[in-house]
Image (tube, coloured by chain):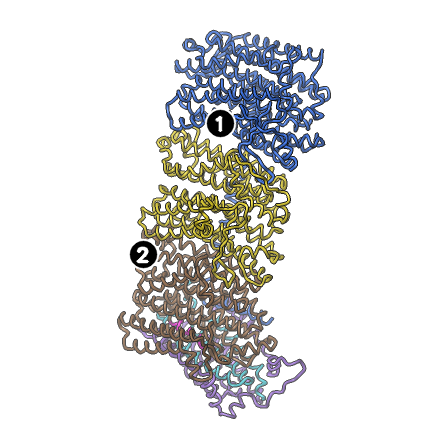
Chain colours: A blue, B purple, C yellow, D brown, E cyan
Amino acid sequence: MTLSLLAQAGESASPGGAIGLLWLTIALPLAGFVVNGWLSVRRSRAKAVVSFVGPAVLFASFAVALAAFLQLQGMHAEAPIVQRLWSWLPVGNFRIDLALQYDQLSAVMLLVVTGVGSFIHLFSVGYMRSDEGYARYFAYLNLFVVFMLVLVLGSSYPVLFIGWEGVGLASYLLIGFWFNDKANADAGKKAFIVNRIGDFGFLIAMFLLWNAAGTLDFSGVTAWASANPGLAGSGLVTAIALFMFLGCAGKSAQIPLYTWLPDAMAGPTPVSALIHAATMVTAGVYLVVRSNVIFAMSPVASTVVAGVGALTALFAATIGLRQYDIKKVLAYSTVSQLGYMFVGVGTGAYVAGIFHLVTHAFFKALLFLGAGAVIHAMHAAYHATHSHADAQDMRNMGGLRKMLPVTWWMMLLATLAIAGIPPFAGFFSKDEILALAFARGAEQPVFYVFYGFGLLAALLTAIYMARLMAMTFLGTNRTGAEEQKHLHDSPPSMTIPLIVLGVLSVIGGAVNLPHLVGGHQWLDRWLEPVLKPAAETAFGRSLHGPEGSTEYLLVAIAVLVGIIGLVIGFRATLARPVPTPEAAPAERGFARVLLNKYWVDELYDRVVVRPFVWVSRALLWKATDKGLIDGALVNGSAWLSRSVLGKAGSLLQNGQIGFYVIVFLVGALWILRVMAG
Amino acid sequence: MATFIFYFFAVAAVIGAALCVVQRSAVASAMWLMSTMFSLAALFIFLHAELLGILQILVYVGAILVLFLFVVMLLNLDTVGRDVRGPAGIGSSVAIGGLLLVELIALWRYTPERIVTELARLPAGMTVTLPAKSAVEVAVAKQGVVGALAEPMFRTYLIPFEITSLLLLAALVGAVVLAKRRI
Amino acid sequence: MTAFLDSIGYGDWILHVLVLLPLVGLPLILLAPERLAKHLAMAVATVEFVLSLGLWWHFDPAAGMQYRSTLAWMPQWGINYSVGMDGTSLVMVLLTTLLGPITVLGSYRYITQRERAFYCLLLAMITAMIGCFIALDLFVFYIFFELMLIPMYFLIGIWGGARRLYAAIKFFVYTFLGSLLMLVAIVVLVWKVAAVTGKLSFAYGDVLSHISAAGDAAPWLFGAFALAFAIKVPIFPLHTWLPDAHTEAPTAGSVMLASVMLKIGTYGFIRFAVPFFPSVALSPSVSALIVVLAVIGIIYGALVAMVQPDFKRLVAYSSVSHLGFVMLGIWGLTLQSVQGALMVMIAHGLSTGALFLLIGMMYERRHSREIAAFGGIARSVPILSLLLTLVAFSSIGLPGLNGFIGEFLVLLGSFGRYPWATGIAATVVIFAAAYLLWAIQRIVFNKLDKPENEGLKDLSVRELVVLAPLIIGIIWMGLYPAPLLRRTESSARQFIEYAQPGRSSAINPVGVEVQP
Amino acid sequence: MNAIDLTTPLGIAKALVPELILAGSALVVLLVVAWRHRTPADARLAGWLSALGLVASGGGLAWLWMSGARADGLPQMIAVDNFRFAADALILISALATVLVSLHYLEREGMLAPEYYPLILLGTAGMLFLAGAMDLIVLFLGLEVMSVAVYVLAGYDRRNAFSAEAALKYFLIGAFASGFLLYGIALTYGATGQTNIPLIGAVLGVGAPSLLSRMGLGLLLIGLGFKVAAVPFHMWAPDVYDGSPTPITGYMATGVKVAAFIALTRLMVEAFPSLDQFWQPVIGVLAVVTMVVGNLVALAQKTLKRMLAYSSIAHAGYLLTALWPGTHLSASAVMLYLGAYTLTTLAAFILLGSLGRNGERAVRFDDIAGLARRRPWTAFALAICMLSLLGFPGTFGFIGKWYIIQAVVAARQYILPIVLVVTSVISAGYYLPVIMAMYMRDPGEEAEWHGLRLARPAAWVTGIAVAALLVFGVLPRRAIDV
Amino acid sequence: MPQASFIGPSLALSAILFSIGVAGVLLRRNAIIVFMCVEIMLNAVNLAFIALAQLHGVGGQVMVFFVMTVAAAEAAVGLAIILAIFRHRQSVDLQNTNLLKG
């Protein structure tokens, strides 16, 4: 009870103004969803309406978000601003309101989601125009934004969970958007189910939290944690944190639950850009930062987070080296980058995590949209020539630089950014994570290992990105003589977003420019109120960024690694001509392992999926249900009484008076025996 | 003397019954049954039921047994082959009959005194002395052999007596219906 | 609203009317010509629903048992027709009356032969069910409890599928066994109480207030009650009648069976079994047994559902899984878990009802319930597919839809008491997604490869009208369950109070409600 | 309230009004048929006359009952109390129903010998005596009158070998059993010097349970156990029920059972209450065995008639359960259940008789498939009967079962009720298939009952019986208060 | 009352005869003989009655009188039935009377 009082105290009411209109940011996409959904159900051909409504609602809510952001900036609010819409689950002392929480963290997320989202919507107008499910597509996309915003604005874990699962639903629908192809439908299903495994962890975390803290409001939980510093390092907190991280691992595709993300590329490319690169998959990182105090109170859990992150970063990067599908490469790159973010938050460098989240949103979205543009062009080409070659296989591309100049330039920027070349956005965020991981190594040596992983991953990142760029845009074109004529850059509705995101990937680093280069860590100070609870824990206090020479050294190493990687990548790829898929020689050795992604999917299928199905069908259904319970017990008893006992009695009734008399007398003798006493 | 008479007829009755059961021919069985009836009649008389003794002979021997014999003859059943059941049958019947006997023979120990004692639940050790003459003798002495039976028959036992008329009527009708050749 | 209702003495007659009205409909239908039967039934059911709707506002959430009234029946044996209603009854009665018109309207096309009989039985069943939920006399409850069997038995047996005879008798005998043992238990209990109070009374209140009289017979009596209700619920391993009954029954039957009849089992636990014998029900061994069985049911149901080739069977097994949550919640014995259990009861009623209706509609179009018979129908019947997917997700327990509310509360509330059991039960969020999404994919998505699925007609207006209330309910309950929770709260507290005196009020201060 | 002095002939006459009327009408009918026994019309005449007689005797009974007659002082020979009156009413109803049904049945089966009706009347008179017996002698004689008449009736269809065999089996085992009964009477008489039931009770109440009395009790139980067809003395019942003409089967299953059970109840409650520690275990075991065997074997039957035969055995088991406590509550439970059972079984057998043509032994479950389509009312009635036999709420049968459970539970006995309900569940396994066949299966191509009608009198009886089942099922107060 | 002392022996005798009768019923297949055995049983009971009447008065004897009537009636009906059976299958062997069974 007292705790929930604290929770009330820890919030300040909504000040009105743009922030007061915050609910609009959700309502607008919702309206878009309704309109588009209705249009799609009516099977109407009104594409113009869709093309307008779809993006428009996003830009509108982006505007609201921007206004709210500016207002917040002017306020220096220490406590989160909570808008209670209505009481959702009032059950005795467990009371969850449908409420929006607006603070510095959600503000950042809100901007990223609506901002990047808007441009991706815009891009989609061009990309999906010719698709028959155009309206349906935008309905889903708007729906996704609705849930994503609920996720970032929710003021308590259950409300966040609505968004958390909602985005899963949207991604399920969008991955399986072209459901005619079983593979796509499978991918969607896989994504949802794997996510559910994570959600299970999330649920358990909530239950533990509720039983411990008696509240599930963010502010309430924070208050509870700060109120009992004694809990730090306790098994309870560790358990909560780890279960919560299981949820994050599912959402953000970390080992061991990453396998759904590459498959998710089955969806339309803008979807991959928005959901599976920029926003949804980063929800896990957001959750950790949101619960920073919990993780900060459990160094063990934090270490696990960082460890898993580092491992994933490296692991995914290696796979990325040997993929030929352009989207698959980017998918694994996303997994790897998410790993970075977790290294960051695991280290306790929550800002760095968010920082990388933001920059990553920019350049990864850009990369995907670029890839989208490429695929779009390839499709058009193949469509024109009725060829059925794979439009996503980089071995069919090459030399596109001339045909798609804009795309080339923009993607190049993104590549430099992700490779961590200064002064591009990616450099700063990635460097900050690595540096702080290194610093953490001071009292937890294992972090040196993580740092090493990170560095290695960075190298690989640079290599596979260079490989991607080279195979796609450089060298000679392998699309085919006839097709080449049809390859050309996309319409402005698609190039504009590219350019915007390109600019952002260049200057995105400004958000948290380190003192080193004369910046003043704006994001650090901005998020300071949100992260104070964590910073006050021993874990938080023990983290100091590297100073002086070390700092310079680390930066130098990072930059060097990036450059080396790029060089290796370009040279190795351009060294000899790339064979077309048909002509490609069978991979050998480790390359083959990488090409087949370590056979992890196959492993899961054999070890988890099939056994479950087998047990359910053979053991539980056929044997237990049909055989034992129904067959043996239920029908068995019926059979016993009718066909055995009943029949036996019937046979004894043999029509012989003599026998009847005998039975009679047996009874008589027994009765007399009883009477004789 | 009395003892001898009793046991003589008793043994006769038993033998008669036993032979009636085991005789292969129906007529022979009937004959032995008749002998049993006679010895029982004798016992009745011995036990101060003179009238019933007579009736026993009249009704049973004179009517019922004749009826049996009549049917036996009519259906000419005397010639049917051995109808005694097989060894299993014999075994079971002897066993069951024996057991039944074991249950019932316990009544052997009953003396009038014991009955009275149990009746009135007299404290143990207290002995009852029965009147010199049995209840029946008293009645007979008062109203004569027939009167002793007739008096209660038409007073106390009026209703049963009437019922017997219904019984006979029913039996009559039934027998006719079933037995007459064509309806 | 309330003022108006009071002005017409609503509270005094409503319960009796609810029970009698459908019966009044029977002669009308029997006398009317065959073709009018369904419309008459529809009229009756609708009136019934409209009348019952008043309860929503008129019912006083703060008060406990209300609308009590008693009519003498066999007073010399302490048997009277006495009824009353608390939050739990309220929501269940409303669910029943809501489903009345829906099932009738839903059967317009489905039922083509012997319509009179069909609708009569349907109405009779509604009466029996409502009676069950409001009976406050053990004898009366038992009568209604049994009377439910006959209509359902005929519904399955006459209008059912291929193996209907088997399903019908299995359903009947299963339930009959349990209920007869319960009858013995009731009589024994009443006589034991009478031995103390000196007056024979089957009244719920009288028995409850002298329940200590049960003495050391309590375990046996509880066993009899529990068995009867466990079969109805059904709790693993007593569930095997359910798949057959569900699968063979006509749509209306399946809907009523799943949405209401199963709940009478759990309702029985809440109303009778546990409050009567708390010491037994909550003894470590018994609660361990129940909880374990509930968890087994939850997981087992989900896993078996996953591999069903027949969509109706799949839903049937999913019911086993969901009802397991209710049992877990009841035994969780915190306000959250009990409220959650009630929510699951309602949510399952809505979603599963909608699912069965949709299956029925698919069956009317394709004359098959095999999942394999469909595929890619999202192209041919988008609206149907959309609704099917939506309902499926509500059944999966997607937050924001009704399914989540109950399950979440149950797990949350039971976690403190049975962390391990609850933890295991929580894994069902994975399996539920697995079996339903798999089915949905094979039906709605994938390639539209069967020619006979191309020409299907999408939902007609009538069918939309049938589904609309359920769909609205699903979303509304998912986003704003507070009104429901407010109405059931007092009865939930009452239950906990009975189950372990002094506990509910101690740790559960009433939360004040924040309205939008 | 008028007291009847049973020592004066007038008093006796008063007390015996129903029996006398019955006997009288039997004689009248006999006279009539003596002259007219040629054509179906004659048979019908006899039938209506006997029906009249039964009604008249029912009137006499009503008069006795309404005038609240009771014995003045110790009841001699014959009881004068509501227990007897209620029993008599049931017996008369069953007889009347039998007569009315037979009207059509005899013609259909070509059994035109009109002595049939006097026999029924005489047998009924015997039942009345048996049910009203306050003296072992009356008990024995009444039982014999009844039996002799029923032996004949069982074999009445003379062209039918089954009927003859039924008669033989019934007769031989019956005579054998009455030997035991008689022996029991003898020993009881020896132990107490009395044949008057209440006096026996009084005497035994004083004395310790002597060997003589116990043996007597045992033998009496055996003798009556045969009449009520309690396992293991039941073996004759299925065959005899099966072989006899259906109306007679109904008559046996109801009238005979009622009379015998009433006598048994009287004996246990009024003559041997002091020996209950001896007879209760016996009755208990008999009840359990009877319920189990009856229900299990009924499951395995193919024809309706035999199924009903076994089910009537099972119901004897329920009745024994009701008798077990030997309290007055249990006596009224026996009476109530007898009422429910009689009504139901009568209706069931009448319907069965209407279904089968020349030989309803042949009516199998398959033969009534789809009956509901062609003959909705017959099907409905039969369905109600089945539910009532099953003891389903809403029917009289349920009230009866509930009352039994009540009576037994009141005596702190819990095993019997459990066995009772479990076996009832088993019985669902053969009652429900009847309903299923009628309602849920499609008519077989050879529907031999097709076009056959239920004769009007039979229809009345059935209608009334079924209506009564439902009415008492919903408003049992009347029935219970009786 | 000298004869009264024969109550015990008489009861024993009646028991013996009764058992013999029962055994006979089991032993024979000829319907008529079986019926005779039943008659033996009845006679045995009569003996018991008469013996006991010694003590309890004429009631017992009256009973015997009725029993005889019953025996006569039963004999009539029984033999009629046997006749009927014989008409159907030219034999009174009980082994063959098993049309009804199951």
When asked about the image quadrant of residue B173, the answer is bottom left
Residue of label 2: D448
Q: Quadrant of the C terminus of chain A?
A: bottom right
Q: CA distance from mark 1 to mark 2?
A: 73 Å
Residue A581 spot, x, y in % from top left? 48, 15
| Contact between labelled residues 2 and 1, with CB atoms less than 8 Å apart | no
In this view, the residue in front, D45 or A217, is: A217
Q: Which residues are magenta?
A: D141-152
User: Mark 2, chain letter?
Assistant: D
In this view, the residue in front, A580 or D121, is: D121
Residue B168 spot, x, y in % from top left? 39, 79
SS at circle 2: loop
The numbered disc on residue A27 is 1
Seen at 56% across and 34% down, the residue is A97
On whether residue C205 falls in the magenta region, the answer is: no
Three-letter amino acid code at disc 1? Answer: Ala
In this view, the residue in front, C119 or A29, is: A29
Residue D196 spot, x, y in % from top left? 51, 79
Mark 2 neighbour density, 10 Å: few (under 14) some (14–19) many (20 or more):
some
Q: Is residue D296 visible?
A: no
Looking at the image, the residue that sits furthest to the right is A443
* Magenta segment, prevailing SS (helix, strand or loop): helix
Residue B111 spot, x, y in % from top left? 60, 82
User: Which of labels 1 and 2 is toward the front?
Assistant: 1
Mark 1 neighbour density, 10 Å: few (under 14) some (14–19) many (20 or more):
some
When asked about the image quadrant of residue A44, the answer is top left
When asked about the image quadrant of residue C49, the answer is top left
Quick check: C151 above or below C420?
below
Q: Quadrant of the N terminus of chain A?
A: top right
